[in-house]
Amino acid sequence: MDYLHNHWQGNHSLARAFWINSLPFCVAFNLLFEQISLFNNPSTIITYARLYLLIMIVTYIVILPWQIVGITRSLVRYIKNKKQLIASLLVIIFLLYELTVLSFILFNSPQKLLDGVYISFSSYEKGGYEISLDESYENAILVKGKFNRGISNELEKVLEDNPQIITITFDSPGGLEFEARNVFSIIKEKGLNTYVSEYCVSACVSAFIGGEKRQISSEALLGFHQGSPELGLREFTKDELSDKLYDAIKFYKQQGIDKKFVMRFFRTPPDALWYPKINELLKSGVITEVLNK
């Protein structure tokens, strides 16, 4: 605490205030943002939002004021005592650069901060789904209803109690994309098959494509669209839309699904659905087999 207080008072040498108390902070800040960007995907969106908020709050409310005030006071004392302008000028340039960069980040973050607060502290809608043994399909579990908070955890529990399961069947209007991606990961990791008898749209298809065998009935409907920002609070910016398209292409590609198919359904706005024909689903690799109902 004495060390922190001495920096705040400007009692440290300018060299210590700069090389130890200031410059490493900038390096650490950049490294942290690079690391948390690894969590910026639908399956870990809550973790990303909370880490992002934590770093922004600690940086702008705690570390930055302490660092700037301390190095400024050390700089003023250094100029008065040493009167060496070159070293002083370099530190001033560093401070101006740091403040410019951090101000730019903050200026461009209001919407991201608002989204982060909402995502971090929202409980989301719970319930609204049912996970049970599917008696109409051998060794199968039926996932029915909306992909709301907790559905992936519930699926894991049911699978643990029923190790004989080889197929997950879906009947869902979609829901939270990050939960659908979590279900996708569970299915893919366990090497399960997936099946749709009637209806699977929006986030549901993100879970469905996790299957090793991806089967649908001849009467089933798979519905695709662009998707919307978390909780649908606003529209995507152009940059965000570009990033989401890249993420979707990468996500579908790991299951051997054609890039052109992803680009096609991404043209469908969030408030609409595109229902590809069965031959399109087969050709693009979304499904592997069609079963007569």
Image (spheres, rainbow, N blue to C red):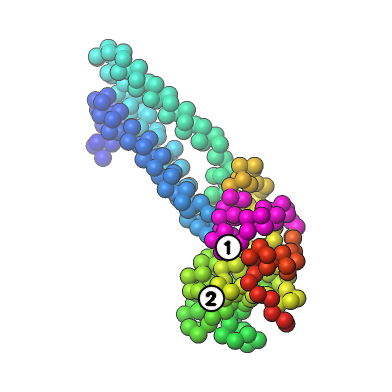
Task: Name the one closer to the observer, 274 or 290.
Answer: 290
Magenta highlight on residue 95: no
Residue identifier under label 2: 192
Q: Position of residue 169 (x, y in %)?
A: 62, 77
The residue under the point 54% across, 40% down is: 109
User: Which range of residues does the magenta coloring cover?
Assistant: 245-272
Residue identifier under label 1: 256
The residue under the point 70% across, 56% down is: 265
Q: Position of residue 277 (x, y in %)?
A: 75, 66
In the picture, the quarter occupied by the C terminus is bottom right
Q: Quadrant of residue 122?
A: bottom right
Q: Are marks 1 and 2 in contact (CB under 8 Å)?
A: no
Q: Quadrant of residue 215?
A: bottom right
Question: Considering only vertical position in the picture, is 175 above or below 243?
Answer: below
Query: Under tag 2, what secondary structure?
Result: loop
- Residue 153 seen: no
Q: Position of residue 84 (x, y in %)?
A: 27, 13
Task: Name the one closer to the observer, 207 or 91.
Answer: 207
Question: Considering only vertical position in the picture, is 175 above or below 220?
Answer: above
The amino acid sitting under disc 1 is Gly
The amino acid sitting under disc 2 is Leu
